Image (cartoon, rainbow, N blue to C red):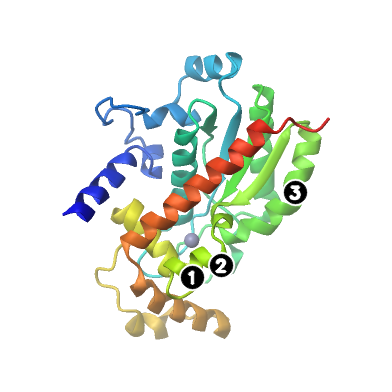
Amino acid sequence: MKLHSHRRSFLRNLTGVSLATLGGNVTGAEVEPAGAGYINPRKVLLYESTRKEFREAIEGGALQAVILPTGSTEQHNEHLAMINDTASVTLVAQKAALLLYPKVMVATPVPVGISPHWMDRKGTLTLKRETFLAVVFEICESLQKHGVKNILVLNGHGGNVAPLRESVPEFARKLGIRIVTNSYWDAFTPEIVKKYIVSGKAPGHAAEFETSFAMAAFPERVHWEGVDYEKIKPHLKIKDPTSALQEEEFAREAKLATSAKGEAMIDIAVKWTAGRLRQMIETPAAK
Ligand SMILES: [Zn+2]
């Protein structure tokens, strides 16, 4: 079927993208046969590049911007992996960088975010606001020292949004380079959400959108097996009743997820992110 082959090529395009690559299961070996315009996905990942490759890219003037993905390691209800946000944002970043090759690279993602609000759900890891921001700043500072002049801090976790918005302009001033921040879902206008997401919520949390994204991008991180939300609900002991109700709603909405919705939304996020970068690269920095 057409849809089937489309889906397979979509997944093939993601080879080497997932954060699993950080775990050593690397990338670059299992690439597509060279085709028109094909680029080895490794080439846009700073953390998979050699120092020779990075040095030549920056000193030769080809590399004009770096994306720093920020995510989380946090509970994603009963069925999605904790790394979901980090893996999602890294994927969007990498695909956007590939569209702009060789102008953009992706720095090592910040894999833990600000998630104190999920600490009554098992498995969540959280950083204090100041710790998280210090990590982001020092990565930007490292990049600045190597000559990077444009950084997009691309976020994939709700709890990081406000702290990044408040602090990134100051980081830029301190370092004397351009640094901007967006969440990849800034790509989704109300019309786009309405068109693809029945529940009307994107990103939401481990609900229809995030589950669709994961089904499209990394189905190996979606685990419905043995999940019975109604049965487990009384054992969860969620302190905040509003939060408990919302989670229940999200768990129901997650059943509306499809990989086709995920693919469509990923495509929109990738193109939007590439546009954001293009805008950055093409606009001379203000003095
Ligand atoms: Zn999430």
User: In the rendered view, does 192 fall on the left or right side of 148?
Assistant: left
Q: Which residue is tagged 1?
A: 194
Up the image or down, 248 lies above or below 60; here it is below
Label 3, label 1: how far apart the Cα atoms are: 32 Å
Q: Which residue is tagged 2?
A: 190
Q: Amino acid at mark 2?
A: Pro
Please rate how many residues cluster around mark 3, counting C-alpha atoms within 10 Å: few if below 14, some from 14 to 19, many from 20. some
Question: Mark 3 vs mark 1: which is more N-terminal?
Answer: 3
Label 2, label 1: how far apart the Cα atoms are: 6 Å
Q: Quadrant of residue 117?
A: bottom right
What x and y, as percent, mark residue 195? 45, 68
Question: Is residue 254 in sight in this rendering?
Answer: yes
Image quarter in which the C terminus is found: top right
User: Could you say whether the residue bearing mark 1 is in a helix, strand or loop?
Assistant: helix
Q: Which residue is tagged 3?
A: 167
Please rate how many residues cluster around mark 2, counting C-alpha atoms within 10 Å: few if below 14, some from 14 to 19, many from 20. few
What x and y, as percent, mark residue 193? 50, 66
Q: Residue at x 62, y 40 (%)?
A: 152
Question: Is residue 76 in sight in this rendering?
Answer: no
Q: Are marks 2 and 1 in contact (CB under 8 Å)?
A: yes
